[in-house]
Image (tube, rainbow, N blue to C red):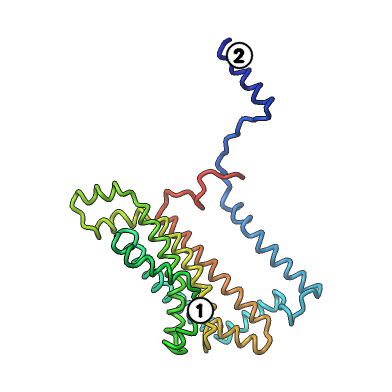
Amino acid sequence: MTVTAATSVTTEQAQAAGLVAPRARTTADRPRGVSLALRTLGPLALLAAWQLSSATGVLTPDVLASPGQVVQAVGELWGNGQLADALSTSLTRAALGLLFGAGVGLVLGVVTGFFRLGEELLDSAVQVLRTVPFLALVPLFMVWFGITETAKVALIGVATSFPMYVSTSGGVRNTDRKLVEAMRSFGLSRWAVVREVVLPGALPALLSGLRLSMTLSVIALIAAEEINSTEGIGYLMAQAQNFSRTDVLAVCILIYGLLGLAADGAVRVLERLLMPWRPVNGRAVVGR
């Protein structure tokens, strides 16, 4: 039997058994404009459903204000300066808490991921603290710091430190040990190896941890601004609740959502700048 005949018989047998030849997947070269349009379909559909529900009376103003009323509320709050002041205060809180929390998580992650002694001394304690919900710390922080900005920033810092710690520690542990040993053989100190080899190698994990920390900073900000705030987006929400202003409540909720979206977008930009060789969205081969 020739090779061609054998191949033919094998193919016929495979088809009779219900097997099919796999099709190679191709890359999707979708234009950026089309991709952006597809991403906006979901939010636009939600906005249209919201407007339709308000126009038909399914959603009354005492339940949820219409999109037009929300736009008017934005103009009102921006015109009297309340929205600008609240945004400045909330962004400062979130940024300070994120800077503190991500910094601590980064340092602890490097220490426990690269140094065995650091892992033995610190990892168990950090893992125990990580299982404590950060909302449970609100009463304790109020006792320690009082009703001050320190309590709010500290709460955001604690919430954002653990995602950064876990990602950093895992990324550092996955560094190629042979490469580390090679660099040590050239006379580099441990901290030089961390700076020149370990951190660049763990960059994808670091950016993933930063993305989680930035998203969580917005969630922690909402909780922090419930601690008797006298300024910030949380204060606007409390005032709107007292006066049953569903339009202002919707504005504040949308702002929190946009802050989270902006934080995620900022990390995506960082990924493209620091890792230009990485496929967009981490997908090398995708379907259409």
Task: Classify the position of the N terminus by image quarter.
Answer: top right
The residue under the point 77% across, 69% down is 52
User: In this view, which residue lies farthest toward the left?
Assistant: 187
The residue under the point 42% across, 84% down is 150
Report x, y in % for residue 111.
31, 63
Q: Amino acid at mark 2?
A: Ala
**Left or right, 196 with reference to 80:** left
Q: Nearer the viewer, residue 209 or 15?
A: 15
Task: Classify the position of the C terminus by image quarter.
Answer: top right
Report x, y in % for residue 266.
47, 64
Q: CA distance from mark 2 to mark 1?
A: 73 Å
The residue under the point 63% across, 55% down is 38
Which numbered marker is on residue 202?
Answer: none
Per the image, the residue denoted by label 2 is: 5
> CB of mark 2 within 8 Å of CB of mark 1?
no
| Residue 81, quarter of picture | bottom right
**Left or right, 51 with reference to 270:** right
**Which secondary structure lies at badge 1?**
helix
Image: 272 above or below 248: above
**Which secondary structure lies at badge 2?**
helix
Q: Nearer the viewer, mark 2 or mark 1?
A: 1
Local packing at callout 2 (Cα closer than 10 Å; few below 14, some 14-19, many 20+) is few
Q: Amino acid at mark 1?
A: Ala
Q: Nearer the viewer, residue 104 or 238?
A: 104
The residue under the point 38% across, 60% down is 169
Comes first in the chain, label 2 or label 1: 2
Which numbered marker is on residue 136?
Answer: 1
Report x, y in % for residue 26.
56, 39
Local packing at callout 1 (Cα closer than 10 Å; few below 14, some 14-19, many 20+) is few
| Residue 68, quarter of picture | bottom right
How many numbered marks are there?
2
Report x, y in % for residue 172.
35, 56
